[in-house]
Amino acid sequence: MCGIVGLLVKKPELRERLGELMMPMLLGMTERGPDSAGLAVFTSPVAEDWLKFSLYCAKVNFDWIVFEDAARHALGKDTRMSVQANHAILESTAPAEKVKDWLKQAWPQVHLLSVGQRIDLYKDTGTPGEVAARYDFAHLKGTHLVGHTRMATESAVTPAHAHPFTAGEDWCLVHNGSLSNPYSIRRKLEPLGIQFDTDNDTEAACRYFEWRMREGDDLPTTIHKGFEELDGFFTFLMGTRNELALVRDAFACKPAVVAENDQYVAIASEFRSLAKLPDIKNAKIFEPAPEEIYVWRA
Amino acid sequence: MASVMERAPQVREGKVVFDLAEQPLRQVNQFLHQDLKAAGVKEVRVLNPDGAHSIAVGLNAPVHVDIEGHAGYYAAGMNQHASVTVHGNAGPGVAEGMTAGEVRVKGYASVSAGAAAHGGLLVIDGDAGLRCGISMKGIDIVVGGSVGDFSAFMAQAGTLVVCGDAGDALGDSLYEAVIYVRGKIASLGADAKVEPMTEEDCVRLGALLKKAGFAHDPKSFKRVSSARTLYHWNADANQEY
C-alpha cells in the first residue's frame, strides 16, 4: 500500500501557497504510507543555460559548505547552493553530464535525486509529517507537485527506495501498487546500458518510461507501451515541467480520486486527502477510469 | 485545526449528531453498536465524514444513519438492520457483506460496491466503479448510472440493476444472480448471456425500481444471466474457455 498526492494550481497567486495547500493532502496519506515520503515540486525555471540538481546525503552533519566550495572549483563559479537538512539544491551552468560525473567520482556519498530547470525533489524515510517538517514542505512554492507516502511491500525502506523516481530532466514518477515483472524489465534494459540505482519495482517502470521517451516516444505513446510491458497493479502519477499525468491499470486495483475546480486540480489515492482543500465542496470530484491517460497542464 | 476527542454527542431534533471533524470515528461506531438501544435513538447524523473508512459498519439495530458527505472504504459494510444514506460519494466496498437493511449512495460509488453481500438493498444514484456486485450472494443492487468492468463477477444470487451502461466482462462466471441493464453492455463475461425479458422479470424489476426510486420502464432493460456452461467440468474443452 502507498499513498499518492498531486496538486496543480491554476491561478498564479496560488503558486505561493502550493506547499501549504498540499500539506493536509500528504498528511492524509499517512496511514497508507507511514515509512517514507517524498515530493517533487515544479518551480519557476532557473535562468536559461542553468540547471538545478536536487542532492541527498544520508550523513548527519555533512559539511555542505566544503561541498559547495568543491562544487565551485569543479563546476565553475556560476554555481550556487541552498541546503535543507540532508538535502541541497545545487544550481549551475555546468552541463548535467559533467555534474553527474563529478558527483560519482568525487562525492559518492552524495546522491543525485533530480535534474532540471524546474524540479526540486525531496525524499526520505520517516512518517509523512516528519519528512514534511524536515524539509519544510509547507513553504514550497511552484506551479504543481507530485507527492508520495510509502508502505514498502517489495523492497527495502531507504531514502533511495522512496518515491518519486526521476528520469531525464524535469520528469518524475510516483506509484501506488506493485509490479510483478520488474526483473524482466531490468534484464531487458540493462544490456542497453541503462543503469539502476535500486531494486525497487517502481524504478523499473521509471527506467522503462525513460528509455521509451529517449527513443523518441511522446508521453501518451510511452504510457501505452507501458500498459503492454508492465505487469501488475499501478496508479502512476507523473510530473513534467508543465504537466501532471495520471494513469491506472486495467483493473483499477489501486485507488485514485480527482478534484477539480477553477483554482486547482488535486489528485489523491483517497478523498480524505482532498477534504481540507479550499472550496472542495464545489469541486468536480471523480475517479479516473482504468487505462485512460489524464493530463493537466500548468 | 480542531482537536479530535471523545465528548458527548449532540442531540438535535431527536437525532444524535456526531461531527467527525471534532469526534473520533470510533465513538460513532461504538455508540451505534453499544449505546443506541439504551438511548432509544432511531436516527443518527454523521457530519464531516471527509472520506473516513468504515463509517457505520456492522449495524445490528434498526437505526437510520445519514452520512453528510463523502465516505471512504467499507461504509455501511456488513449491515444487518440499519438504513444508511451517504449524502456524497462512497469509497471502495460500500455495503460489502451486507445481510439485510438498506444503503443509499447519493453520489457515485467506488469499486466493489455491495461485494459478497447476502441481502438487503443497495441503491447508488450515480455511477458505480469496477467490480460492482462482485461475488454477490443475495443482495439487490440498483445503480442509477453506469457500472465499471467486471461487474457481477461470480455473482451467486440476487439482482444487479444498471440503469445506465455496463463495462467490459459483465457477469463473468455468473451463477444464479440476474442482471438487468438499460443501456449498452461493452462486453459480456465468460458464460454470461442476454435473454429475453419475461413477464416475471418485468414484475420483479418494476418492484425493485420503484423501491429504489427510479421511474424507468422495466421493458427498456435487457436481462443477463448465466448460460451455465461453466457449471460442469468439460474435459473436451482442453482448458480453453
Image (cartoon, rainbow, N blue to C red):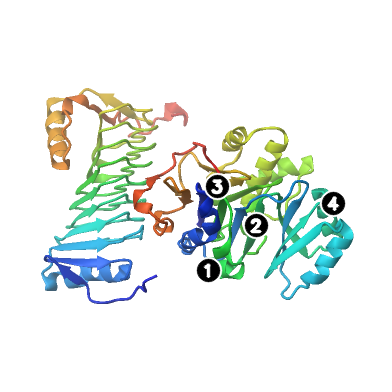
**Closer to the camera: disc 3 or disc 4?**
4
Q: Relative to residue A224, is residue B14 depicted above or below?
A: below
- Label 3 vs label 4: CA separation? 30 Å
Residue nearer the viewer, A13 or B124 = A13
Q: Residue at x 25, y 62 (%)?
A: B46
On screen, B205 above or below B30? above
**Image point (37%, 74%), residue name:** B3
The image shows residue A296 at horizontal and vertical percentages of 52, 41
Q: Earlier in the sequence, mark 2 or mark 4?
A: 4
Same subunit under labels 2 and 3?
A: yes
Instruction: Give the label on residue A237, or none.
Output: 3
Q: Are marks 1 and 3 on the same chain?
A: yes
What secondary structure is marked by label 2?
A: strand
Mark positioned earlier in the residue sequence (1 or 2): 2
Q: Amino acid at mark 4?
A: Lys
Q: Which numbered marker is on residue A98?
A: 4
State which chain disc 2 sits on. A
Identify the amino acid type marked 1.
Gly
Q: Chain of mark 3?
A: A
**Cα gap from disc 4 to disc 1, whole angstroms:** 35 Å
Q: Position of residue A35 (x, y in %)?
A: 56, 66
Secondary structure type for disc 1: helix
- Quadrant of the drawing holding the C terminus of chain B: top left
At label 2, which amino acid type do we have? Leu
The answer to which of B233 and A163 lies nearer the viewer is A163
- Residue that numbered label 2 is attached to: A121
